[in-house]
Amino acid sequence: MPGRRAPRAPREPPDAAAALELALRFLGTRPRTRWELERRLRAAGADAVLDHVLARLAELGYLDDDAFARYWSEQRDRHAPRGRQMVEAELRQRGVTRDVIERLRSEPAARRPEDEGLPETEEQRARVALESHLRGRPLPDDRKAVQRIGMFLMRRGFDGETVRAVLRKAGQDTIDDTP
């Protein structure tokens, strides 16, 4: 019958070297959390060598949930600003533990020269998200449209107080820009 695949023969579980290679290929696309890598290795049937491979990767510096949390947060600020609530929820979905998230929240962001222009505060993140959403258009005058934009920002993880402040400021800027 066309389109049907033959059933796969059961695979041999990978040995330590093969599991390490599989893990490194998985890490090649982007940094991963320990939980993500553990899931991937378990799916490949590497349960027997799992602890050894994870320990080796941590020893080599490829597996660091603190570094991953900083990376994820920075990437969000750089490409798709989200509120802290949303970033923390995304980190939890990737298996980052609560204590790592607490450390990320409490440590001041180390600014590097390449971080110039990245938002530093929650309000700045919301402003960048709003500007990206509006794509150069002014904030609409229609109350319902402004409410929809506010809900957009809230879905991005910004709290109501921040959303209201950013929309008020954007509305004020629109009024100031008119001749």
Image: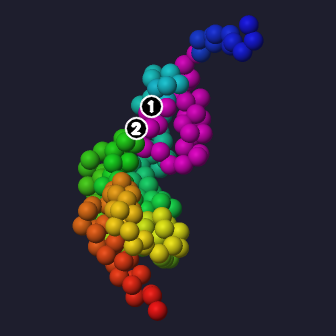
Is 38 on the left or on the right of 5, as rendered? left
- The N terminus is located in which quarter? top right
Q: Residues within 10 Å of mark 2 (few under 14, many from 20)?
A: some
Closer to us: 28 or 143: 143
Is residue 57 at least partly visible in the picture? yes
Q: Is residue 22 above or below residue 32?
A: above
Magenta span includes 140: no
Closer to us: 15 or 82: 82
Q: Main secondary structure of the magenta part?
A: helix
Give the residue number, with chain letter if any, for mark 2.
35
Where residue 128 sits: x, y (%)? 44, 70
* Residue at screen point 37% across, 59% down: 148
In the picture, residue 2 is in which quadrant?
A: top right
Is residue 119 at least partly visible in the picture? no
Where residue 16 sits: x, y (%)? 54, 28
Is 155 on the left or on the right of 18, as rendered? left
Q: Is residue 129 above or below residue 30?
A: below
Query: What amino acid type is highlighted by mark number 2?
Result: Trp
Give the residue number, with chain letter if any, for mark 1.
39
Closer to us: 33 or 178: 178
Q: Is residue 49 above or below residue 71?
A: above
The secondary element bearing badge 2 is classed as: helix
Magenta span includes 39: yes
* Residue at screen point 47% across, 50% down: 61
Render colour scheme:
rainbow
Q: Are marks 1 and 2 in contact (CB under 8 Å)?
A: yes
In the picture, residue 12 is in which quadrant?
A: top right
The secondary element bearing badge 1 is classed as: helix
Magenta region: 12-40
Q: Residues within 10 Å of mark 1 (few under 14, many from 20)?
A: some
